[in-house]
Amino acid sequence: MATYSKNGVKKEIIGKLRRHFSRDVAEATREQVYQACALVIRDALTDRMIYTQNELNEQGGRQVHYLCMEFLVGRSLRSNAFNLSMQEALEGALADLGYEAQDIFAEEEDPGLGNGGLGRLAACYMDSMATIGIHGNGYSIRYENGNFRQKIENGVQVELPSSWLDTGAVWQISAMDDVREVRIGGAVNSIWQDGKLTVEHVEYTPVLAVPYDMPISGYHTDNVARLRLWQAKSPIALDMQAFSQGDYLGAVEKVAMAESISKVLYPEDNHLAGQSLRLKQQYFLVSATAQDICARHKAHYGTLENFAEKNVLHINDTHPALVIPELMRILMDEEGMGWDGAWHIVSQSVAYTNHTVTPESLECWPTDLVQAHMPRIMMILAEINERYCQELWNYFPGDFERISSLAIIADGQVRMANLAIVGSFSVNGVSALHSDILKERVFADQYHIYPAKFRNVTNGIALRRWLCEANPELTSLIASKIGNGFISHPSELQVLRNFGGDAVLLRDLAAVKRRNKERLAAYIKEHNHIEVNLDSIFDVQAKRLHGYKRQLLNIIHVVDMYHFIKNNPHVSVVPRTVIFASKASPNDTMAKRTIQLMLSVAHQVNRDPDMEGKLKIIFLEDYRVSLAELIMPAAELSEQISVAGREASGTGNMKFMMSGALTIGTMDGANVEICQAVGSENIFIFGMGAEEAQSLAASGEYYARDYYNTNPALKEALDHIRRGFDDGEEYNDIVSALIDGGPGKTDHFMVCRDYESYGLAQERVDQMYRRPENWNYMSLVNIANSGRFAADRSVAEYAQNIWRVHTSFAY
Ligand code: 26Q
């Protein structure tokens, strides 16, 4: 590990400003200073990346290739500086140059290369792979337009494009010598020659995949992981002249089609948008990636026979599952292998993580679409399916119904989850509960056939980003008690449990929280023009907007609290600031209406003098990684209130906990393990469990109106929402969807069923908040037990139980 001095870094920044922008510091813009800092750090990183790649190549160990349609990496400047132990030198240098480091960090646009949990998880895992010394490569798409920017206009969400490349391109190095060609569309001619079948793919549209590499630093190590982002480019553009004679328009169209592939990230999360461009994106990612890995492997070993021994391709959800037939294609059509040999290699090198049980997000693609865009892949899928169905016959003889439900191709659809399970050596869920649900319900038959494939790896988060960088004061406080070993060995946080009786520490903890609340309050003042009460509970629900995540449950309860305060002006209440931060998918009307409802309630409550100092509702626009870094450290109550059995894991829950927030939540996803870790007395659990929720939904007899009729507070809140608020907006549609259908047809996410128990849990929260020493103790217990939710632990489990690669990290 190199060490850096303030003066050395300063000199380098000045040099970069001169050479790249022809500016002296005095004339440089803030953005140029940011760019100069980034270039300084990038130099340090690229040296290490080359070194890491060479060294690990020489060692010849197994490489991990992590394929994901999303990598929500967040800002790079500070995190790389932190990991390289350069942060102090950099901040000092910037101060000398007359800049506040925070302002320079804030120049960097968040690269929105993802929607939410899935993409952020991939980014956290890159950090851990680099840190614990795994030869990790991430693969994704270099979307020109990442996730949209959210603006609220007249109470509704509008979507604006984001231009992350202006400040993000500096972190990426193009590797023109590794450009690959992906073939879309066309037709396949099969030719029998000398008793052997050869195939010829003709009339396809060639699309170039141009790689851009982002070095991802590890903490306190020279190891750097590489995230390779593919950009689509048409080769035809280079040769437009030749086309101008003939089919000019056709050529232009082909160029546009090719380059549209990496234009935009689909903004749906946990929902299937069946557009054909999305399918092309998925194939583009896997084809470029599989060719890349094979070419590198072959260059090193001269053969692909030992491919599975040296590579594992991890597919993050089913989105990259076409890598299975694509690898088959390369091994057979390009390498001349037979089916069985190729299948053995493929199915021994692919591993699959499932992130969802919601039926509407289990991926299926119409066979005609697959046939049209990737005809050779469709042929291979048909053959995989054929052989698999033969095998199924042995397990379930005569059971046509079951066999067709397990088939990879049926009813004119390709079912990606079935493909992923058949073509992988490992299938895992992302929390203990979720993995059990996969085995017992969603993939019960597949589990019966392949019991040994199934496992669990509970998610984790990057401790350095979410604790050290986002919450530096808490980090110092912890380090002052237990040393800083926990930064590399998160389980050491447990030592904090010995300090439960340390009244001074508990007070200091509260003081840190208070300062973090002040920071967020200042942001709220600046952006929402609202003054919040620093003595109130900062009660936060920050995550994508979704029916199953039940933001509605929260906002109905807010209306209920509003009524209570209105009706009992002299009763002393525990003041609350309820904070929402959430993007809705642009096509999800109900989600967008829910945001509008939050804003209507906020409009009325925040203007009502009777609420002064008691209740405020804040909606924070444009939730993204950098905003999360500000929110998490300031939160006191973490809302994790999904209908049990639906949230695969959740990772926000872990970020809040690590910063000392207490959870109010259902027994869902990783909440179950958080509850186990802290003890049920240190968390506010409410509502149905997963089994009860499942059987109530399956019974078809759930009837939300029964709860409305028997719970006056709920009735009043819903009536009010239906009638509307003083901004003139009424919400008959939302309330109607909750209670106006017949039994089995109302309130899909059983908000009314859990309403009473949620309210009681909120009362327990209030009671506890009145006793700060108890609250602070609970907060300490949460921090102390958050170590097992560090991504280092998750990645080490992947390494040991799935990837079978060495790591020295012990957990
Ligand atoms: C698929 C096809 C077409 C268009 C979009 C999609 C698509 C995109 C994103 C489907 C799903 C997603 C994202 C899913 C996701 O974020 N799942 C979350 O993953 C987290 C990490 O494991 C878990 O913690 C969350 O519980 C889970 O909801």
Image (cartoon, rainbow, N blue to C red):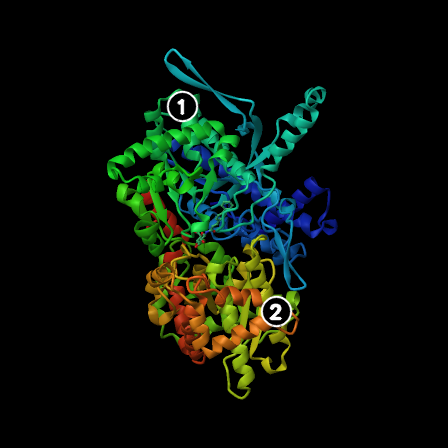
x and y, in percent, of residue 734 in the image? 54, 65
- Residue 648: quadrant of the picture: bottom left
Of the two numbered discs 2 and 1 on the same chain, state the one appearing first in sequence: 1
x and y, in percent, of residue 472 in the image? 50, 61
| Tag 1 residue | 332
x and y, in percent, of residue 755 in the image? 44, 71
From what the image shows, is residue 726 above or below residue 66?
A: below
Please state which amino acid type lies under the numbered disc 2.
Glu
Relative to the observer, which residue lies in front, 795 or 591? 591
- Secondary structure of the residue carrying tag 2 is loop
Q: Is residue 99 left or right of residue 183?
A: right
Q: Is residue 806 visible?
A: no
Q: Residue at x 58, y 80 (%)?
A: 613
From what the image shows, is residue 126 above or below residue 255?
A: below
x and y, in percent, of residue 169 in the image? 61, 42
Q: Residue at x 54, y 55 (%)?
A: 625
Whole-number angstrom distance, CA of label 2 to CA of label 1: 61 Å
| Tag 2 residue | 730
Q: Residue furthest front?
A: 742
Relative to the observer, which residue lies in front, 88 or 388? 388
Q: Is residue 52 visible?
A: yes
Relative to the observer, which residue lies in front, 661 or 234? 234
Q: Is residue 161 left or right of residue 743?
A: right
Relative to the observer, which residue lies in front, 448 or 12? 448
- Residue 390: quadrant of the picture: top left
Please state which amino acid type lies under the numbered disc 1.
Met
- Secondary structure of the residue carrying tag 1 is helix
